[in-house]
Image: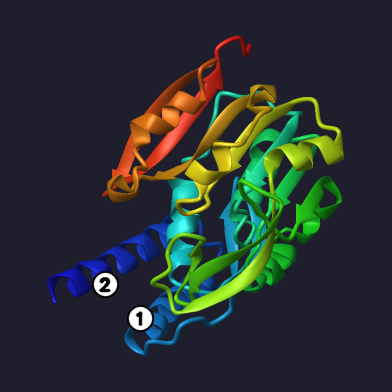
Amino acid sequence: MESREKEVKNIFKISKIIISELSANHITSLKIMLHALCSYFFRISAIPVKLRLVLCGKLHDIKVRTLSDYFTIYEIFIAKQYEALYTGKGIIFDIGSHIGLSTIFFENSYNPSKMYCFEPLPENISLFRQNTGKYYDNIRFFPLALYSYDGEVPLYYDRKRSNAGSVFRKDKKNAVVVRCKTIDSIIENEQISEIDIFKFDIEGAEFELFKNFGSKDIVNIFIGEIHADKKNGFEADEFKKHFKNYSCRLKRMGGEKYLFFAERTDHK
């Protein structure tokens, strides 16, 4: 009961902060509260809702589907977890683009020359395309997962948490087989010589992804989430060993989840 009460408090705390800082009008504020109430108390897993929010100082009409989408809005636009000391104009990779919120942040914060976005879950892809429509001319979108090999991989997900699709969380009720590619094959096919920011949020697959990433030194800045799992040998400090030419730091986000930041030591 205590954990349920804590979850309710967190949901409404986040909703109130979003209403206070990002809501464009009273209608949007009402929609957010009703969405939170209906989704949580009536156990409806996914209700698409259109919101008008002020993101990065600009009005955006976006669609959200689950309560986890509100936590993502908070992390990106209020906590600004992907903020970096970066002047912009280069290439940005957005791995685990979800419903397009991180893409909107990068497009408005850094004005990249090109965004390369990757999202494998079909339910998220539709919302990604709707939410990022105004930026689509600058986006190269790949409806696939990045992984340690080229081929296919099962993706497990929870319909109540659109941001929790994972190749490792096999306790989830739903699964879909998705295409996957290595980062190196994408870089070679797209003839990319430099990546300014490489953002990743792939729910535990980061350890598998980076072990075969041979051309990582073309990246100036890495920002992403690490989901450590000690029983499977995934240690946050071990992850840093993949980045010998980088200055790295970790910020604990709760439990065994960390925000990872790495900047190439010769990057100006």
Q: Is residue 11 above or below residue 198?
A: below
Of residues 201 and 229, which is closer to you in this image?
229
The residue shown at (73%, 58%) is 132
Can you say which quadrant of the picture contains the N terminus?
Answer: bottom left
Q: Position of residue 90 (x, y in %)?
A: 75, 29
Of residues 11 and 1, which is closer to you in this image?
1
Can you say which quadrant of the picture contains the C terminus?
Answer: top right
Q: Is residue 5 left or right of residue 160?
A: left
Quarter assignment of residue 182: top right
Q: Amino acid at mark 2?
A: Val
Q: Name the colour scheme.
A: rainbow
| Label 1 close to label 2 by CB (< 8 Å) | yes
* Residue that numbered label 1 is attached to: 40
Near mark 2 (Cα within 10 A), the count class, few <14, some 14-19 or many ≥20, is some
Q: Is residue 63 above or below residue 224?
A: below
The residue shown at (76%, 55%) is 142
Q: How many marks?
A: 2
Q: Amino acid at mark 1?
A: Tyr
Q: Position of residue 13 (x, y in %)?
A: 31, 62
Q: Sequence order check: which comes first, mark 1 or mark 2?
A: 2
The residue shown at (56%, 23%) is 85
Q: Position of residue 109 (x, y in %)?
A: 64, 37
Q: Secondary structure at mark 1?
A: helix
* Residue that numbered label 2 is attached to: 8
Disc 1 to disc 2, C-alpha distance: 8 Å
Quarter assignment of residue 184: top right
